[in-house]
Amino acid sequence: MSIEKLSVESKRELEEMITNQLSSIRENMTVVCADVPINDKAKLDILCHDDNGQLAIIQISTSEDDTMLLHGLQSMDYVDKFKSFLKATYNKHKIDDQEKPRMILIAPSFSNAVRNAAESMSGMSIDLYEWEYLKLGDQKLLHFQRMFGPKTPEKPKEIKEPERKHEQKPKKKEQSTTENQEQPKETEVPPEPPNEEPPKPEFVTPEEEKQKRRKFF
């Protein structure tokens, strides 16, 4: 099945197709109004808001056009000044008049001048989308390709600390009650002196004494 690339010459026709396919650009977008004159030369093509109430200015073009960035900046400045008025006028819509609006440019192509200008504008939320009108069999579809836009900040990943294993302390062996109880100290008994009888004095008779003397001499 071949794919055929079609052209869109009418800006009104392109606006209707984009309005019907807003979810292809950003989810939960609601159109507030369209074709709002800003000054003698500039016009706000589509004004819408997301589910958080942030307003979005959409500028569209059927061809590569550098002036659409200027018109988009003028429209953004206009909407930012009159957010409270727009909220009161379109009170059926959920509009946050405290949030700064964003800008979305949709064209078949963008010049390097527009790309560089969008990248250099700090403090502004600007998205660039290129569109293609395709025919696939009997079906026609407006295809969008996001070429530039602010990066959505990623949530920091939670770093889980490794679970610390509770080291089980070695259980002390329960001492038996007999071991825990202090043994009474044995009182030392001094040794008894040996029972030795004192030597008995020898009694010598006068005759025995005479005999000893004889033997000695």
Image (cartoon, rainbow, N blue to C red):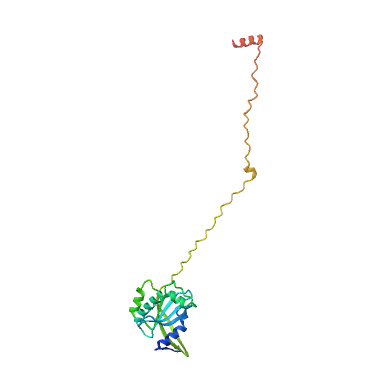
Q: Position of residue 118 (x, y in %)?
A: 36, 76
Q: Which residue extends farthest left?
A: 113
Position of residue 197 in the picture relative to residue 89 (left or right) = right
Q: Where is residue 9 in the image (x, y as percent from the top left)?
A: 39, 89
Q: Where is residue 57 in the image (x, y as percent from the top left)?
A: 41, 78
On screen, residue 9 above or below 115 = below
Q: Which residue is drawn at 43% across and 77% down?
A: 56
On screen, residue 114 above or below 217 = below
Of residues 168 and 197, the one drawn nearer to the viewer in this rendering: 168
Q: Residue at x 61, y 10 (%)?
A: 213
| Displayed quadrant of residue 17 | bottom left
Of residues 107 and 137, the one drawn nearer to the viewer in this rendering: 107
Q: Residue at x 44, y 77 (%)?
A: 86
| Displayed quadrant of residue 78 | bottom left
Position of residue 126 in the picture relative to residue 200 (left or right) = left
| Displayed quadrant of residue 122 | bottom left
Position of residue 9 in the picture relative to residue 191 (left or right) = left
Q: Where is residue 181 in the image (x, y as percent from the top left)?
A: 63, 41
